[in-house]
Image (cartoon, rainbow, N blue to C red):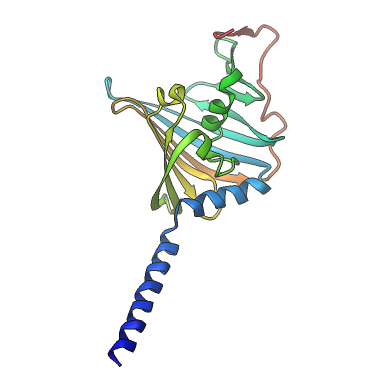
Amino acid sequence: MKKCFLVVLMAAVMAASAFGQSKQGNLEEVLNLLDRVSLGFRTVQTNFVWDQYQKVVNEHDVQTGVMYFRRAGTSVEMAAHIQHPDLKYVLFSGSQLQVYLPRIDQVTQYAAGKNRQDFQAYLVLGFGGRGHDLLKSFDVRYAGLENIDGVATYKLELVPKSPRVKGMFRLITLWIDRQTGMSVQQLFQESGDDYRLAKYSKIRINQKLPDDAFKLKTTGKTKYVRPNS
């Protein structure tokens, strides 16, 4: 009788353990979610708040605006319309990153070249990319569950493999919505205590985007510069 009781007890403990693991999730579960979302991904529109903190001067540079993502073949394109504190437009398409400053009417163009994978891995992080593709560019660690502004999320910690990207960000943390598979918060930790915190809200998935979402609103007098040409 005692032996039977022990068998039942052990089975119950193992079942409880398995339930706990399922409830907590794991890295493979998150990567599979991102893979599934990527299959049906076409577009995303989201509001954002970017907070750049610099420890040496103890200052926060906060920018707000709207971001757009869309599938382009096997890649994802990104456009950001920064509305505050100054107008700025950022466009990543193909193998080129462009930044337009209307105040000085200038577009700065950066050719991704052989670093295109690094550019895309960083700029479209958490929006439409395959989960297992993260493993190509980052060492990824599952860090559990966390509630962000009322949203249940998976937390992932990413260490860039590329020396170039690692020189900019030693650690990137993503909070992925458990329902939609989209990133609702990102933390990019630089050297020392400097960081960039990005928060996303009003995320609209696979809906029609504005016609001018991926157009730089330049003028006939816009100056174009290419720092790395």
Near-viewer residue (55 or 138): 138
Residue 195 percent coordinates (x, y): 36, 29
Q: Is residue 99 above or below residue 195?
A: above
Q: Quadrant of residue 59?
A: top left
Q: x, y (%) of residue 123? A: 54, 30
Q: Residue at x 54, y 32 (%)?
A: 121
Asked whether residue 59 is in view, the answer is no
159 above or below 227?
below
Q: Is residue 71 left or right of residue 59?
A: right
Camera-nearest residue between 137 and 90: 137
Q: Residue at x 62, y 51 (%)?
A: 36
* Quadrant of the snapshot with the C terminus: top right
Q: Is residue 127 left or right of residue 3?
A: right
Q: Quadrant of the N terminus?
A: bottom left
Looking at the image, residue 103 sits to the left or right of residue 207; the answer is left
Question: What x and y, as percent, mark residue 78?
Answer: 61, 31
What x and y, as percent, mark residue 142?
A: 41, 48
> Can residue 192 be seen by looking at this rendering?
yes
Count of marks placed on residues:
0
Above or below residue 156? Residue 117 is above
Q: Residue at x 33, y 27 (%)?
A: 194
Q: Quadrant of residue 66?
A: top right
